[in-house]
Amino acid sequence: MSKKIIIGITGSIAAYKAIQLISDLMKKDFHVEVMMSESATQFVTPVCIQSLTKRKVYVDTFDDENPAIITHVDIVKDADLFMVVPASAHTIAKLANGLADNMLTCAFLAATCPKLIAPAMNVHMYKNPITQRNIQSLKELGVYFVEPTSGILACGDIGKGKLADEDDLMDMIDFALANKPLLGKKILVSAGPTQESIDPVRYITNHSSGKMGYAIAKAAFCLGADVTLVSGPTHLKLPYGVTCIDVISAKDMYESIIESASHQDYIIMSAAVGDYAVQEIADEKIKKNDETLTLDLQKNKDILYELGQRKQANQVLCGFAMETSDLILHAKEKLEKKNCDMIVANHLKTAGAGFQGDTNVVTMITQDDMLDYGLMSKEELAYVILETLMDLEGQRC
């Protein structure tokens, strides 16, 4: 059964951006009901939105087609989420003080489902202590917020006040709709490749895209965890709500992870860390003078092994394995040698699996079990990995 989302649009120049969000939610098979403040209709028309949702857009509190139904109460009874996007300073002030003078504010007050607000306004209006007090009051009542971004605003001012990017809006919708079994947990995730410099121009790396690690970080945040992502160089957008530590080399990653590890409940090492680094990095670009070039490489510190040696009784440690032959054999050996609770073995040679794609095929290996998972998206797989790790943690209790 599809989730029901109430979208409330207020009088902000960013109101037009809500149209694309609504369209994308419809494509994801959400049941979308839309309410607008009177001011919002000055920026976008109800007819435009009705053409997307195929449902009536509500503006007037007293526009009840059926006298037996009080719309602003009835429509939110089975809602899974009430989202105000964009939210003007005026509407935020009303919501913070319990004012109910239009369809949107009445319905918001009547709703018992999770609530999410995405502010959009002038930078000085947003930073005004009164607005910040109103936002804080709503947060203390359990209302979620998607922080606005900085940039050139419609009025010409530069600063924080732009409506959050749609990716961030979608991430927070997922967060608001999800159960929070990892609430209070700290999770460290590594992702992406590492780069080992040869000279100021060249480096040694691998084909990792970081997509699996970023998907795990996003899923962990949606499930309520406090997530730190240690990421090698990628072109991926950071998931909303995740703290990121950017690194380049295996040495950088080792230092960042070891420094943070002792405070974590779960550590998930999905990064493709380089095994070797150049022994002496050239100060100048190496000239193409000879037919061959010999580089002396030295072994990098084994981060997963070090984590296994330092693992605390309450910690869950997950590693990844990728081999071109004898994958399961090597993964089982890695599980034992690195003192891991689980190894996720990537089937590199299987169609749809591997580094750059959006899907994967894996085998999850624990001390007591081995589970094969067919082709699925990395976003789906991220939740499966986290659920399996939660089960392993639960078995200890």
Image (cartoon, helix red, strand yellow):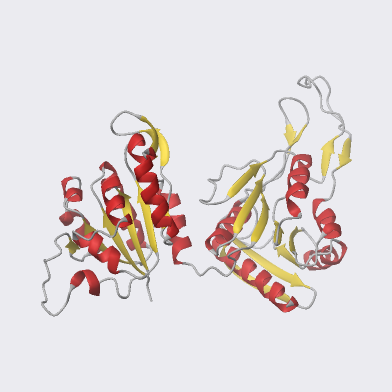
Quarter occupied by the C terminus:
bottom right
Q: Residue furthest bottom?
A: 68
Residue 163 appearing in the image: no
Left or right: residue 38 compared with residue 387: left
Give the number of callouts.
0
Left or right: residue 248 compared with residue 374: right
Where does residue 314 sit, x and y in percent of width and height? 76, 67
Whether 257 is drawn above or below 366: the answer is above
Whether 82 is drawn above or below 304: the answer is below
Would you identify the image quadrant in which residue 80 lies?
A: bottom left
Q: Residue at x 58, y 66 (%)?
A: 383
Where does residue 367 sit, x and y in percent of width and height? 80, 74
Q: Residue at x 75, y 53 (%)?
A: 261
Q: Residue at x 12, y 70 (%)?
A: 64
Where does residue 363 sit, x and y in percent of width and height? 70, 69
Would you identify the image quadrant in which residue 109 lies?
A: bottom left
Left or right: residue 147 compared with residue 121: right
Quarter occupied by the N terminus:
bottom left
Between 78 and 276, the one lying in front of the other is 78
Between 161 and 346, the one lying in front of the other is 161
Where does residue 115 sit, x and y in percent of width and height? 38, 62
Q: Residue at x 10, y 72 (%)?
A: 65
Would you identify the image quadrant in which residue 317 lies?
A: bottom right
Residue 94 appearing in the image: yes
